Image: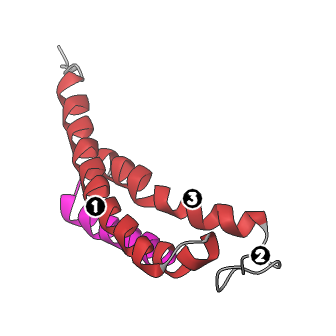
């Protein structure tokens, strides 16, 4: 019989596990929405970095709770970095295309 990985206890609820998994979505969805709705790109980048740092810290810290190691959490966080940056870029493209597609209303 195999022992449980360190950190995995019977007290953890399903909601706790779902919250840490869902936090990985924060820089992905957040980057897309920041790029779309925040006009100042410097503010959007700063917020995206904060979203990524929060998600990466939680992913790495809770990796053993999911039957993995901290090293695998680091690898997952490193893969998440370019994905979140790409989502911010796609959000800015979405913002620019929306601005171009809007018809100009001129008063006669």
- Between disc 3 and disc 1, whose residue precedes? 3
In space, the residues marked 3 and 2 are separated at their CA atoms by 31 Å
In space, the residues marked 1 and 2 are separated at their CA atoms by 50 Å
Crowdedness near tag 2: few (<14), some (14–19) or many (≥20) residues, C-alpha within 10 Å = few
Q: What residue sits 25% from the left and 42% below the top?
A: 90
Res. 44 mark:
1
Q: What residue sits 54% from the left and 72% below the top?
A: 68
SS for dot 3: helix
Percent across and percent down for residue 82 are 25, 57
The residue pinned by badge 2 equals: 1
Magenta-colored span:
39-58
SS for dot 1: helix
Contact between labelled residues 2 and 3, with CB atoms less than 8 Å apart: no
Residue 19's place in the image compared with 97, above or below, is below
Percent across and percent down for residue 78 are 30, 67
Q: Quadrant of residue 65?
A: bottom right
Q: Does the segment drawn in magenta span residue 45?
A: yes
Q: Is residue 12 left or right of residue 83?
A: right
Residue 102's place in the image compared with 68, above or below, is above
The residue pinned by badge 3 equals: 22
Q: What residue sits 18% from the left and 19% below the top?
A: 106
- Between disc 3 and disc 2, whose residue precedes? 2
Question: Looking at the image, is mark 1 or mark 2 nearer the viewer?
Answer: 2
Q: What residue sits 26% from the left and 30% below the top?
A: 98
Q: Number of marks in the image?
A: 3
82 or 89, nearer to the observer: 82
Image quadrant holding the N terminus, namely bottom right
Residue 63's place in the image compared with 33, above or below, is below
Percent across and percent down for residue 16 are 71, 69
């Amino acid at each position: 019989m195999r022992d449980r990985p360190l950190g995995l206890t019977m007290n953890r609820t399903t909601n706790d596990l779902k919250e840490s998994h869902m936090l990985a979505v924060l820089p992905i969805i957040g980057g897309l929405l920041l790029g779309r709705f925040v006009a100042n790109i410097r503010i959007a980048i700063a917020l995206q970095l904060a979203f990524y740092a929060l998600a990466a810290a939680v992913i790495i810290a809770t990796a053993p709770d999911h039957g993995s190691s901290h090293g695998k959490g680091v690898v997952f966080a490193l893969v998440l970095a370019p994905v979140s940056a790409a989502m911010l870029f796609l959000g800015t493209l979405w913002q620019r295309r929306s601005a171009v597609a809007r018809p100009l209303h001129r008063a006669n």
